[in-house]
Image (tube, grey):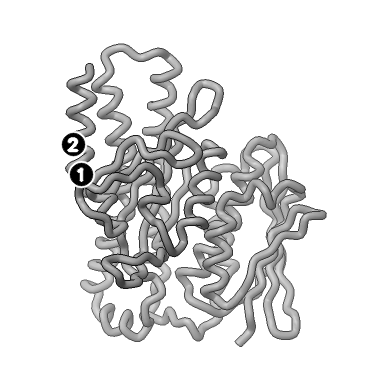
Amino acid sequence: MKNKETQMLGLLQKSSVATVVYTSATLDIGFINDGMRAVFGRSVGDKEARFSDLLPDGEQSILGNLLTEIWNSGKPFHLHAYPIRMTVNGSLQCKYMDWNVQPIVDSEGYTEAMIHTVIETSNPMRNRNSQQTDETSSDAKLEKWSHALSHDLRNPLSVAKLGMQYMRSRIQMTPEEHTKWVNMVIDALQNLEKLITDTVEVSRNIKNNQADVNQDMDVAHWVHHITNNNRSFGLGDKKMEIGTLLPVRGDSDVLYQVFSLAIQGATQALAAKSKFTIAINSTRADREVIYTINTDNLNLEKELICYPVLEKMMQELNGKVSFHSKNGSIILNFPIF
């Protein structure tokens, strides 16, 4: 058995997918491959005891807190094209990364290990004019989405592959252990399905390369799409109420991620309840559009694990995110230019 486990770790060490396995809520590292070291500008053979050793400066505190909250939640979490600033060889750099974080929980639901895979990707906020130049033909569009799929699919694929390889290497497994690893593979495959659905939906809505940061974006279409693809809604008494959805201005990729994270984060915070209603509405003030996502969850501020990411994305849009504790609401303030 030890030989098989050693062989599997050897394969992961050589994998092109950057992988690290944490063994505690303080993000102690039980395994890390050279691909992960390379992503964070580390050298082969470096010794990293914790996540803080991977990213000792820049945004280590925000990301470390996020990973710890994911550990405590015991729920998988995905980030797309998240910007991380770090110092590499004495030079400050900004890298954009797709994260897939998969907690492995025991029979009582407590996290006992956590798999973190990372793939470097392109800047989603790059100049729109260069996008229009690069995407003047259908071949260029096809290349763009092929590139996106090849990156985004690797994370859940690597998690599913790891789970199946582990199960194959274990001749005997307890029912609890078997269920845990089967659920991990199922979750990874569901993530694959969602990625494919989202990519097809976005590709259908590209019209004459008109995406531009100076255009007002149709939030209503996004919210309906996010809601329709969230498996929680429509099950029993779990509902989404959609009110007035005013257009907002900014980078379409970032705006979509903001609404996606806010709605999915709110849903995840309410997952343990058999009945809930999430209501989204917007109003226009003097110099801003204000979106309110009401959950009636008075502990939302403590349970929304994606808040650090939301905060940073709203800063990129010159907006802000806050909570209204009396009715468990997320408040998103978008400036009017």
Report crowding for label 1: few under 14, some 14 to 19, many 20 or more residues within 10 A (C-alpha).
Answer: some
Above or below, 35 against 224 in this view is: above
Whole-number angstrom distance, CA of label 1 to CA of label 2:
6 Å
Residue 83, by quadrant, is: bottom left
> For the point 62% across and 39% down, which residue is it?
271
For mark 2, what is the residue?
Answer: 11
Q: Position of residue 92 (x, y in %)?
A: 35, 72
Left or right for 276, reference 183: right
Which amino acid does the dot numbered 2 rest on?
Answer: Leu
For mark 1, what is the residue?
Answer: 15
Q: Position of residue 93 (x, y in %)?
A: 34, 70
Above or below, 159 against 39 in this view is: above
Q: Is residue 280 visible?
A: no
> For the point 33% across and 45% down, which residue is it?
48
Q: How many marks?
A: 2
Q: Position of residue 180 (x, y in %)?
A: 43, 25
> For the point 20% across and 50% down, which residue is it?
44
